[in-house]
Image (cartoon, coloured by chain):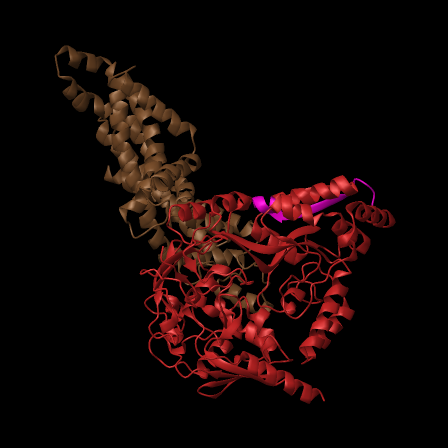
Chain colours: A red, B brown
Amino acid sequence: MMTFRFAKTSLAAALLITWGASFAATVPAGVQLAAKQEMVRNNGSEPDTLDPARAEGVPANNVIRELFEGLTAADGAGKIVPGVAESWKQTEPTTWVFKLRQNAKWSNGDALTADDFVYALRRFVDPKTASEYASSFGIFFLHGKDIVAGKLPPSELGVKALDKHTLEIKTPYPVAFMPDLLTNTQLGPVHKATVEKFGKDWTKPANIVGNGAFTLASWEVNSKIVLTKSPTYWDAKNVQLTKYTYLAVEDGNADVKLFESGENDMVYQLPPGTYEKYKAQFPKEIRNSPMLGLRYYSFLNTDPLLKDIRVRKALSMAIDRDILAQRVTADGQVPAYGVMVKGINGADVTSYDWASWPMDKRLAEAKKLLAEAGVAAGTKLKFSYNTSDYHKKMAIFAASEWKSKLGLDVELEAMEFKVLIKKRNDGEYQIARNGWIADYNDATTFLTLVQCDSDQNQQKNCNRKAEALIDQGNQSADPAKRKALLTEAAKMIMDDYPMLPLLQYTVPRLVKSYVGGYTATNSLDRYRAKDLYIIKH
Amino acid sequence: MWTYALRRLLAAIPTLLAVITLCYLLLHLTPGGPFDSEHKLSEAVLANLQAKYHLNEPLWKQYLLYLNSLLHGDLGASFRYEDWSVNDLVAKALPISAAIGGGSLLIALFLGVALGTLAALKQNSVVDYFTMLLSSIGSVFPSFVIGPSLILVFAIWFKLAPSGGWDNFAPRYMVLPMALLVFINVATIARVMRGSMIEVLSSNFIRTARAKGLPMSTLVLRHAMKPALLPVVSLIGPLAISSITAAVVTESVFSLPGLGKLIVNGAGNRDYTLVLGLVVLITVVTVVFNLLVDLAYALLDPKIRY
C-alpha cells in the first residue's frame, strides 16, 4: 500500500517537475530592452570565497550562483526550475534520479557530466575540504553524516553516475525537498581538472572554470567582481545581461549614496531606520519582499531562572510584536509567534492562542505565571546582543517591555558578533539575540534551531516526543502526512517556549525601476542575473 | 649619517618584535575565534581548519611558526578571504592606500605650505582669515562629516564625481577621497606653517637680511623657508601614519578597497594573520617615516648632526 501511494506521489511529482528547456529571463510583451544590458548591484561585503564547496556567506553564494549552476535552480520568482538536470524522479523513497541535459558545458568547452557532480559532492562532504555547510547539507545524502564526521571515506557517499548524463542520489530517509536543497551552491558541480591543477588558486579569474550563465572577468578584492555572459552556457540565448558587477560595499549609507548617484542599480539592504524615508523618496524603486527568515531571542533553557517554562512563557507574552514591527523596526516585517515562518514548505505556521488576546489579558497571565514561578519584581535578567543600531533598538524595546510590564530588571550587554556567536554556542548567556535565514525551503531548516542534539540549538532545549514526530515525518513518503507531523512537532516544541519568536524578515532595498525580472516572491532572496534584464529608459 | 640610519633601522627590530608579540597575544586573547559562525561546524571540519592554520598547536609554537613565515616574507593565509594569501591582499590594497594617502599628503603639503606662508606674509588680510577659517573647519569637523558632505554636493547634487568605489586608479574615483584627506591635512599644515613663518620672519637674521634690501621673494624662499619648514617636517611622520588611520574612515565613506577596510574587517573577523600582517606593515611604515623625517631635519638645519 505504502509503495503504491509512494509511486503515485512520485509520478505526480515527476510530471510536475519535468519542464521544457528554457527558463531564463522572460521579458514581458511590450517591454523594450535597453541596448546596453549591464547591471551593477551591491553584494553587502566581500565574498569569503568563490569555491562553491566552501562558501558560507550570502555574498559568496550570490556570486557563485552566477558562475556555477546546480542540478536545480530557483527562478526569479523563487520557483524551483531545472538547472543542469532537465528532469528528475524519486524512483524510490530514498532514491532520486536526475537526467542531465546533453548540452550542458563548462566555460572552457568541456562537456559537463554526472561524474562532475559525483566529484563535487564527495569533495563537499570530505572533512579535508572543511566546508562550513557540510554538516548542514551532508546529512541529507546517504552516509553523508558519517563522512562529515570522518568515520567513512567520501567515496561511500550515496551519489553515483549511472551513465554520463544520469545521476543517482541516495538519501538516508525520504528527502522530499531534495530538488529545493540542490539549488544550494555548495551542492553544485566543480571542474575536477581545474581544482586539481591549480589547488587553492583555482578560483582566480585566470583559472576558474564554471558552468553558470556568467564567467568571472575580474575580481578586485573588497571592491568589485565583474561577470560577463558565458557563451558556453546551455541557455545563453535567453540570457539578456552581458555584464553584471557585484560591489562589496559594507556601509549601508554608502550603498544608498552609490544608488542615488547612479553607480549602483540595486542596494544590498537599506540601513536600519531608513525604510520609510526612502519609501517616500523613491516610491518607484523601493522593494520590500518577505523572506524565509526569523528574528528571535534565544532563552538559555538550562539557566537557573529560565529553566522554568512559566518564566519563558511570561517573557514571550509580554512582548508586543505589533508595536515592535510597526514602530520600532518599522520596515515591513511581520510578527512571528512560532519557529516556522510564512511561505515555508513542509510545515504550517503555528501560533500561540494568547497572540490574539488583548495585551491586558496577556499581561495578567504573564504576571500570574511569574508569581507562580516565584520571580519577584526587580529580578535581574541579562540580555546579550551584537553591536548594531538595529539590534540595539530591538533590545531596548524588549528590555523596556519586561521592565515596564513585568517589573524585571534587564541588563543589556552589547558585544561583537563573533563574541555573541561564541557565547551562544557555548551556552554562556541568559537571553541572546538570534536570527535564522532558511538554507532551503523546508521546515527542517527551522527545526534545527530547536531540535534535541542539533548543533544549531543554542537554547539547549529538548523535547523527545517532538523529536519522535520529526523522525516519523522524515521517514514518511507522503508529503501531507509529513507536513502534519512536522507541524505538530513544531507546535509541541514551541509550547515549551524554548525561544522567543519575534519577526519574520523582509528585504527592504532600492532597485532601479529599469531593472526587469526582480520579483517580490523570491523568498530566499536568491536572484540570478540570468533572470534579470535592463528595460529601455 | 648612513651609520645613523642603519643603527636606527636595527634598533627598530626589537620594537617591531614587541608590537607583533603584543598584537599576537591580544588577538588570541580576544573572545570569539575565526571559525565561530552562524552555522556551527562539525568537530571533524573544525579540527581540519584548525590544523590547516596551526591553531591546534600550543600558542608559543604558533607564534614561532608565524615568525618563521614572516622571516621568509610570507604573511600567511587569510582566515576570512580563503582564496587569497595575506601577501596577495596587502599587495592589492597597499597601492590604493598609498596613492590616496600619499598623493593627498603631497598635495596637502604643497597647498598647506603655500597657504601658511601667504597667511604669515599677509597677516590680518583676507588670505589670512581664509586660511585660519579653513584650518578651523578642518580641525573641528571630522572626516565622517566632511566626506558625506562632499558626496552630497559633488556626487549627488552636481554629479561631478562618483560617490565612491574604485576602478583601477581612474582619477574620477580618486578625486573626492583625496579632496577629503587634502582638506584635513591642509588645515593642520597651514596652521603650523603660518605660526612658524611668522616666528622666523620676526627673527634677527631676517631683520638683518631685510635691512640689507633683499627682495621679499628672495628673503622668504631662500632664507625664511628652510627654518620655517622644520615644524612642518616634524608633522609629516604623524600625518603619514594618520593617513593610514584616517583611511579607515575615508575608505569606508568612499568604499575604497584599501588597507583601512582590510584592517577593520580583519579585526571583526578574527582574521589573525591579516591583522598581524597589516600591523607589521604599519609599524614598518612608521619606523621608516620617522627615520626619513629625522634625516630631512639634517638637510634643513645644518646645526643638526648625526
Residue A315 image point, x, y percent: 76, 49
Residue occupying the point 40% across, 76% down: A191
Say if the magenta span includes residue A73: no
Q: Quadrant of the N terminus of chain A?
A: bottom right
Residue occupying the point 71% across, 67% down: A452
Foreground pick, B205 / A110: A110
Going by the image, does A118 lie left or right of B121?
right
User: Which stretch did the figure color magenta?
Assistant: A374-392
Furthest-right residue in view? Answer: A372
Quadrant of residue B71 in the image?
A: bottom left
Residue A6 visible in this rendered orientation of the protein: yes
Residue occupying the point 25% across, 14% down: B203
Residue occupying the point 67% across, 77% down: A479
Residue B279 visible in this rendered orientation of the protein: no
Say if the magenta span includes residue A388: yes
Foreground pick, B56 / A167: A167
Q: Quadrant of the C terminus of chain A?
A: bottom left
Where B115 sits versus B279, above or below?
above
Where A226 sits versus A359, above or below?
below
Where B44 sits versus B138, above or below?
below
Residue A288 image point, x, y percent: 54, 54
Going by the image, does A347 lie left or right of A537?
right
Furthest-front residue in view? Answer: A30
Residue B211 image point, x, y percent: 15, 10
Going by the image, does B288 lie left or right of A400?
left
Foreground pick, B5 / B183: B183
Tally of numbered discs: 0
Residue A197 image point, x, y percent: 36, 75
